[in-house]
C-alpha cells in the first residue's frame, strides 16, 4: 500500500534528483520513479542496483551504491 507520506517522500526524491544539472540526476530520478519502494529493503540506490529489467535501455547506467 502506498500512503501519502511514502508518495511524498518518493516524489520529493524524484524532484530533487531530476532538478540536478545534467543527465545523471534525470536517470537517477527515472529509476526511483520506476522501482523505489520505501517499504522494501535497502536504500533507493540499493533497490535500483537490484533491478532485473535487462531489456531496459538505461539499465547499464542505472545508479548503484558507491563502495566507500
Ligand atoms: S534501469 Fe531498472 S529501475 Fe531503472 S528505469 Fe530501467 S527498469 Fe526501471
Image: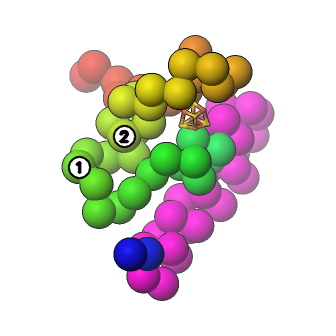
- Residue plotted at (43% across, 75% down): 2
Side of 11 relative to 23 (left or right) = left
Q: Which mark is residue 41?
A: 1
- Residue at disc 2, secondary structure: helix
- Residue at disc 1, secondary structure: loop
The quadrant the N terminus occupies is bottom left
The quadrant the C terminus occupies is top left
Q: Main secondary structure of the magenta part?
A: helix
Q: CA distance from mark 2 to mark 1?
A: 7 Å
Decide if residue 39 is in sight here. Answer: yes
Tag count = 2
Q: Which residue is mark 2?
A: 47
Q: Is residue 16 above or below residue 27?
A: below
Q: Which residues are magenta?
A: 3-28
Q: Are marks 2 and 1 in contact (CB under 8 Å)?
A: yes
Q: Residue 57: which quarter of the image? A: top right
- Residue plotted at (42% across, 82% down): 3
- Residue plotted at (55% across, 19% down): 54
Amino acid at each position: 500500500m502506498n500512503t501519502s507520506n511514502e508518495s511524498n517522500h518518493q516524489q520529493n526524491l524524484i524532484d530533487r534528483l531530476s532538478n540536478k544539472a545534467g543527465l545523471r540526476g534525470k536517470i537517477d530520478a527515472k529509476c526511483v520513479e520506476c522501482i523505489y519502494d520505501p517499504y522494501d529493503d535497502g536504500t533507493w540506490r540499493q533497490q535500483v542496483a537490484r533491478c532485473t529489467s535487462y531489456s531496459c535501455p538505461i539499465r547499464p547506467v542505472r545508479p548503484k551504491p558507491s563502495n566507500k
